[in-house]
Image (cartoon, rainbow, N blue to C red):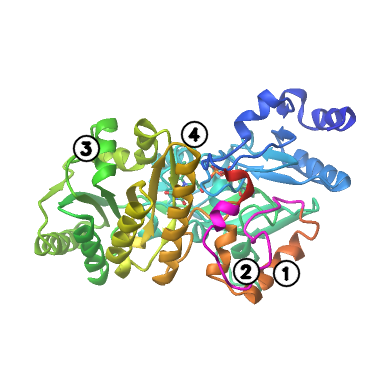
């Protein structure tokens, strides 16, 4: 980038907030998918909406791509860029207003998910979407990915919790959507923005819905001899009409790794465990707990233990939420897949995943939002071994193809980003993709805002030949 442009950027955000040297930029080369790397020309940390508008208008003037970045915990290469500017929301991290009468909060996009819930706690509320990365990820990332989390089984993903958003459009214009009420007037542009992976603009403020902290929370740890049985129990619990707050499965390999890391009291040698959380009022939860116990017993549960105090409950959740981090202790690298199947097909997909792991000789650890059928097979590998990387990518691709074949989708919550775009034709015909492209091009006609994401690199005719993952240039 020429010195003149560097100077203008420094004047807009302040010298210390314009990262321009390779050393400063290095940590922004990827998100949580370390296999996909890129090199922005600058990373900018604006401190106000006005500064973002100036940056976006300047980018338009010089035809430079730009991409918003929250905490960079994304798991689909969404904020990884091959060129242009990264606009970090790290400094826009204020909770502007908590409005208890209207049960809303106005927040900036860089607010960390857990920080919002911690702030709301003394008022008796929380922000319901709780990605397992919640101690780091931001509201902006949650909005852009329509993120989920363990408790989204009952409370829904991010979308129903966003009532309003202010967005800087790709040409620098300001768009205000929604507000403190859930309205139904005209086209749902807010719904369109949520989950659009930062390709339709940069969100600079939200009005979010506050959810009351439930009166009673009961958490159970059910131990089973196999993941197949645990999966069957999930289907039976959902079929019984109960909507648990969370239903999470950890398989044998995950248990051994997690227990050594957090010492939460998970049985390190069990086939699988099911973490079941119920919340609501006392009477309702008592009835639901009895039904859950019966279903577990009928399926030969080895032990069924209830977390009797808050400390133990927190430990169990710490184990679940630290699982990805724990894999880092036993494997040089790991590739987190994110497919989804109807919950009734969980046992089948688990068998398929096992077969695929054997076929490609890779270790796969499963820890996932079972109640939603949202899988996270984690393929453990060593990125220094190129031949192994190829096997990992082929295995990952086959898992997602199986998800689609079972009536599921290639992403449950992590988005498409630059990771899964070439798998989109598995789910959509060319005409469907074209319709999506038209919406994209209406908001982002010059394709400067987070280019190269979501859509396949080339037009396709509905086929996804094996090796699509391998064809993603920068991966290997
Ligand atoms: C350990 C771990 C556990 C995880 N668990 C879950 C989980 O349970 N559920 C789940 O859904 N995800 C999970 N994730 C994935 C990730 O944390 C979520 O996608 C999260 O919402 C990303 O937030 P972020 O702030 O890190 O966004 P980033 O990674 O920085 O960006 C993600 C996308 O959002 C866009 N973006 C960011 N800010 C804005 C903005 N202000 N305006 C417009 N676009 C923006 C970026 O351009 C990019 O496309 C997990 C990740 C990790 C590492």
Percent from the top left, x then y, of residue 34? Answer: 53, 39
Residue 35 visible? The answer is yes
First in residue order: circle 4 vs circle 3: 3
Earlier along the polypeptide chain: callout 3 or callout 1? Answer: 3
Q: CA distance from mark 2 to mark 1?
A: 16 Å
Q: Provide the major secondary structure of the magenta segment.
A: loop
Label 3 – label 2 distance at C-alpha = 43 Å
Viewport quadrant of the C terminus: top right
Q: Earlier in the sequence, mark 2 or mark 4?
A: 2
Magenta highlight on residue 167:
no
Give the label on residue 312, or none: 3
- Neighbor class of circle 1 (other Cα within 10 Å; few <14, some 14-19, many 20+) is few
Relative depth, front residue between 306 and 247: 247
CA gap, disc 4 and disc 3: 39 Å
Identify the mark at residue 384; answer none if there is no mark.
Answer: 4
N-terminal of the two: label 2 or label 1? 2
Which label sits in the foreground, 4 or 3? 4
- Mark 3 Cα-neighbour bin, 10 Å: few <14, some 14–19, many ≥20: some
Q: Which residue is mark 1?
A: 438
The residues tagged by marks 1 and 4 sit, at their Cα atoms, a distance apart of 40 Å
Residue for badge 2 = 188
Residue 472 point in image, percent of width and height: 61, 51
- What residue is shown at x 41% (from left), y 59% (from top)? 399
Kindly check if marks 3 and 2 are in contact, taking CB atoms under 8 A apart as contact. no
Q: Secondary structure at mark 3?
A: helix
Image height of 333 relative to 205, above or below: above
What span is in magenta?
A: 448-471
Is residue 106 visible to the viewer in this orientation of the structure?
A: no
């Amino acid at each position: 980038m020429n010195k003149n442009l560097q100077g203008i950027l420094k004047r807009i955000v302040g010298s210390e907030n314009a990262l321009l040297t390779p050393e400063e930029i290095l940590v922004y080369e990827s998100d949580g998918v370390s296999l996909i790397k890129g090199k922005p020309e600058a990373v900018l940390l604006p401190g106000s909406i006005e500064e973002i508008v100036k940056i976006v208008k300047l980018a338009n003037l010089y035809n430079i791509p730009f991409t918003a970045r929250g905490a960079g915990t994304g798991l689909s290469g969404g904020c990884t860029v091959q060129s242009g500017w990264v606009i970090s929301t790290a400094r826009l991290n204020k909770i502007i207003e908590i409005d208890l009468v209207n049960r809303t909060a106005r927040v900036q996009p860089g607010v960390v998910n857990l920080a919002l819930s911690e702030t709301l706690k003394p008022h008796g509320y929380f922000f319901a979407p709780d990605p397992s990365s919640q101690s780091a990820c931001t509201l902006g990332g949650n909005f852009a990915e329509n993120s989920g989390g363990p408790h989204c089984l009952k409370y829904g993903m991010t979308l129903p919790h966003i009532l309003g958003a202010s967005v800087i459009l790709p040409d620098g214009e300001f768009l205000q959507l929604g507000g403190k009420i859930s309205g139904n007037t005209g086209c749902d542009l807010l719904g369109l923005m949520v989950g659009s992976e930062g390709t339709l603009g940069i969100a600079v403020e939200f009005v979010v819905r506050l959810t009351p902290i439930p009166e009673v929370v009961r958490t159970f740890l059910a131990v089973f001899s196999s993941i197949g049985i645990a999966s069957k129990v999930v289907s039976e619990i959902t079929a019984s009409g109960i909507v648990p707050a969370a239903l999470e499965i950890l398989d044998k390999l995950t248990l051994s790794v997690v227990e050594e890391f957090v010492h939460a009291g998970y049985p390190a040698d069990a086939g699988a465990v099911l973490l079941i959380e119920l919340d609501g009022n006392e009477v309702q939860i008592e009835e639901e707990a009895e039904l859950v116990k019966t279903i577990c017993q009928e399926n030969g549960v080895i032990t069924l233990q209830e977390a009797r105090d808050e400390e133990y409950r927190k430990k169990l959740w710490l184990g679940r939420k630290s699982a990805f981090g724990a894999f880092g202790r036993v494997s040089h690298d790991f590739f987190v897949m994110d497919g989804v199947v109807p919950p009734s097909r969980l046992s089948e997909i688990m068998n398929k995943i096992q077969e695929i792991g054997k076929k490609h000789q890779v270790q796969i650890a499963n820890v996932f939002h079972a109640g939603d059928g949202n899988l996270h097979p984690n393929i453990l590998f060593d990125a220094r071994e190129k031949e192994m990387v190829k096997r990992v990518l082929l295995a990952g691709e086959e898992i997602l193809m199986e998800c689609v074949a079972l009536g599921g989708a290639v992403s449950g919550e992590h988005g498409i980003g630059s990771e899964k775009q070439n798998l989109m034709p598995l789910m959509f015909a060319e005409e469907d993709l074209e319709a999506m492209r038209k919406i994209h091009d209406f908001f982002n006609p010059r394709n400067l805002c987070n280019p190269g994401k979501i859509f396949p690199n080339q037009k396709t005719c509905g086929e996804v030949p094996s090796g699509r993952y391998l064809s993603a240039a920068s991966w290997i």
